[in-house]
Image (cartoon, rainbow, N blue to C red):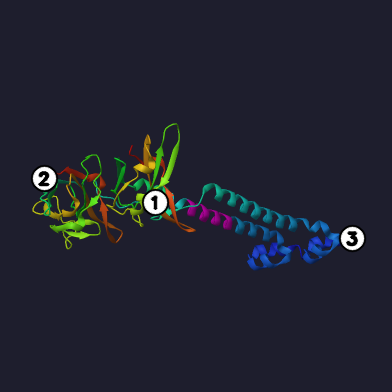
Amino acid sequence: MLLQAPDKSRKKGNFLSTIFLKRNRNGLSVVIGYVLLIAISVVMSVVVYSFLKGYVPKDTTKCSEGTSIFIRDIFYTCTSGAETLNITVKNNGKFSVNGYFIHVSNVSNLDALATIDISSRIKLGGNISGNSIVFNNLIYNYLTPDEPNNVRTSSFNVTKYGRLYKVEIIPTRLQEEGNKKKIVSCGDAKISEMLTCK
Amino acid sequence: MVKKFVKNNRKTGNFSGTFFSVKKRRGLSPIITTVLLITLTIAITAIIFLWFRGMVGEGVTKFGENIELVCEDVEFDASYSSGTLNIVNNGDVSIFRVNIKTSQGGGIYQTKDITEFSSGSTWPTTGLAQGGTFSGSIGSEVGSPSQITVLPVLIGTSSKGKKTFICEGQYGQEVL
């Protein structure tokens, strides 16, 4: 009778009796074995996943390839006390441009990088946003590759920097990342120009 | 008599009888073995985990990925002339600080954080953001090195909070 109990419960598929009946201990080990195997597999998968998750590169929002602007006209007035820099940029790329970072250099060594940020000195032709110039606050990526909005002139008051020798411009674009718009810097489209007094 | 008792107990699966009775010691082994196996497995797993964690190092992440991968997205220009170091961040990743690695020749290298230089006090506390610039004189403190390399330092998060990470040499720029 006692020996028949496991067979009976197995035939009937009585799970609880298999687990809790002392006389069915042979069946218990199989169930625990499966539970342990599955639990260990799940735990190991979670550990490995959380470890490797950080090593998978994410798609970061970058400036679209083919973004390009060039300086069409530059006018630097270096009359003492009335120094002004007028820059006209034109979009000659494939994508619209939202604005730019602008830096000048007052070092005669032309190899030196331009590190003076003059975005806060804008008078006309754009608005300041952080440390960059935005062509139009209402229209995103205002400077289009096509006419009529493909040229923009901006004017800067550069009185307190002394004689300037170089200007460098890095275009920016407003791109979507998820549901948000994000300003991206187009470092590959950076342009520079020597300045001469007019 | 004893043999019969043990045999009976094993058949009936009398656990308490098997466990506490000295005369039925043969019934102990499967339970003890199981307990020992589990204990040993847990102990060995814990030891391996601690050893492995020490070897791998603490994971620092930025923008949801390992900070080493973010180093690839760092874009900056650097120049050094007349003792002045100029840096412009052209990319979208904020450069928290930079390390200046100088070589005096003969295999002697020295690495210093930008904030260790006197001109480093003008370095922005939150780092060089998009389009940010830095210009500082370091010439008197580095002497006349044969080589200067600028290595970006990023800040990320780890289980212990904010942590800085120095990008490897391949992401640096030789300015001299």
Residue A52, image x, y percentages: 47, 50
Label 1 amino acid?
A: Thr
Decide which of A96, B149 is in the foreground and name it.
B149
Given this view, does label 3 or label 1 mark the residue nearer the observer? 1
Position of residue A48 in the picture relative to residue B61 (left or right): right
Q: Residues within 10 Å of mark 1 (few under 14, many from 20)?
A: some
Residue A38, image x, y percentages: 57, 57
Residue annotated with mark 3: B2
Which structural element holds mark 2?
loop
Residue B171 visible in image: no
Read off the chain for label 2. A
Label pair 2/1, CB-CB below 8 angstroms: no
Q: Residue at x 88, y 58 (%)?
A: B3
Q: Which residues are magenta?
A: A38-51
Read off the chain for label 3. B
Query: In 3D space, how far apart are the residues under numbered discs 2 and 3 (Cα atoms)?
Result: 115 Å
The numbered disc on residue B115 is: 1
Q: Is residue A138 above or below residue A47?
A: below
The numbered disc on residue A197 is: 2
Which structural element holds mark 3?
helix
Which structural element holds mark 1?
helix
Label 2 amino acid?
A: Cys
Magenta residue check for A45: yes
Decide which of B53, A57 is in the foreground and name it.
B53
Earlier-in-chain disc, 3 versus 1: 3
Position of residue B61 in the picture relative to residue A21 (left or right): left
Magenta residue check for B4: no
Q: Residue at x 11, y 45 (%)?
A: A197
